Amino acid sequence: MNIPLHNTARALPALCLLIMCLGAFACVRAPYTGRSQLIMMDADEEKALGAAYSKEILQKSSVVTGTSQSRMVERVGKRIAAAAEQPDPEVPKPMEFKWEFHTIKDDEVNAFCLPGGSIFVNTGILNFVQSDDELAAIIGHEVAHALVRHGAERMSQESLSSLLQSVGSLAVGVATQSSGAAELFGSAYGTGMQYGVLLPYSRTHESEADYIGLILAAKAGYDPKAAITFWQRMAAMNKNSNVAEWQSTHPSDETRIAELKKILPEMERYRSGKKQ
Ligand SMILES: [Zn+2]
């Protein structure tokens, strides 16, 4: 097939950009799990983004201070953060964090973290928490997301997928001389990336945050079994109501409880200090 020169020339800058990005990939290993991660985002950039969002959330939300619930969040958060500051000696800490723990007056059963270490816990989830040990499982999960830089990893995956999509569309357009075919490739590839690559990764992040979160809770001296009683209580409640968006992006209660039960013996070793 004869490809007109001007089309080939159009594809070159995009291909060069792709190659440059591939060269700039930072392949790092997640602490504790050793999973390799593709992070194309600078730690300072990640922290600045997290700090800006955190400021916005604090301005827009009803922040709770001086209550027994907010004191509990700060108390447990502080101990989990101290445990997060001592990752596995064989795995260096991914970046510097500024740990902050905020309680938000919101009925939604939710807790979330921002890149860099700002953690938010809604009163809606705190109303179901019966002990510091249970809260440690929730805060541990959120601290783990920040510690392992899941936000930056997710953003990197999304920018890479959109870059590949545009380069792919351009290449199909060049090869077939048809902009229709290029569009079709673009939309099919977009759907594939969403359902085939990005979503399973997200589930990986959630299981990883459960695992590392419980390690942090155990290292901080909390009882890892409390995670199971908490999720069992949530599962019983979920049967009657549509609780939270948080639940839809997280593993199902049954899967989560089964996975947590499997890792309990290992967590007890972390708690007793027999494992670092
Ligand atoms: Zn999560």
Image (spheres, rainbow, N blue to C red):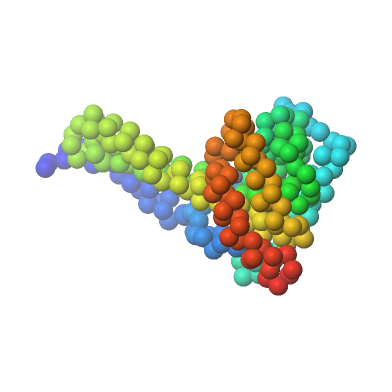
Does the rendering let one see residue 218?
yes
Looking at the image, which is closer to me, 39 or 214? 214
Q: Quadrant of residue 126?
A: top right
Residue occupying the point 56% across, 55% down: 259
Q: Quadrant of residue 66?
A: top right
> Is residue 151 rendered to the left or right of residue 158?
right
Residue occupying the point 33% across, 33% down: 187
In x, y percent, where is residue 62?
Answer: 77, 28
Does residue 235 lie above or below 146 as drawn? above
| Residue sitting at the far right | 66
Residue occupying the point 54% across, 39% down: 249
Residue occupying the point 76% across, 52% down: 133
Does residue 262 lie above or below 51 as drawn? below
Looking at the image, which is closer to me, 138 or 44? 138
| Residue sitting at the far bottom | 274
> Image quadrant for the C terminus?
bottom right
Does residue 250 lie above or below 91 as drawn? above
Looking at the image, which is closer to me, 111 or 170? 111
In x, y percent, where is residue 190?
Answer: 37, 37
> Image quadrant for the N terminus?
top left
Total marks shown come to: 0
Q: Quadrant of ligand 1?
A: top right
Does the rendering let one see residue 93?
no
In x, y percent, where is residue 232?
Answer: 65, 46
> Is residue 196 rendered to the left or right of residue 220?
left
In x, y percent, where is residue 267?
Answer: 66, 63
> Is residue 69 rendered to the left or right of residue 142?
right
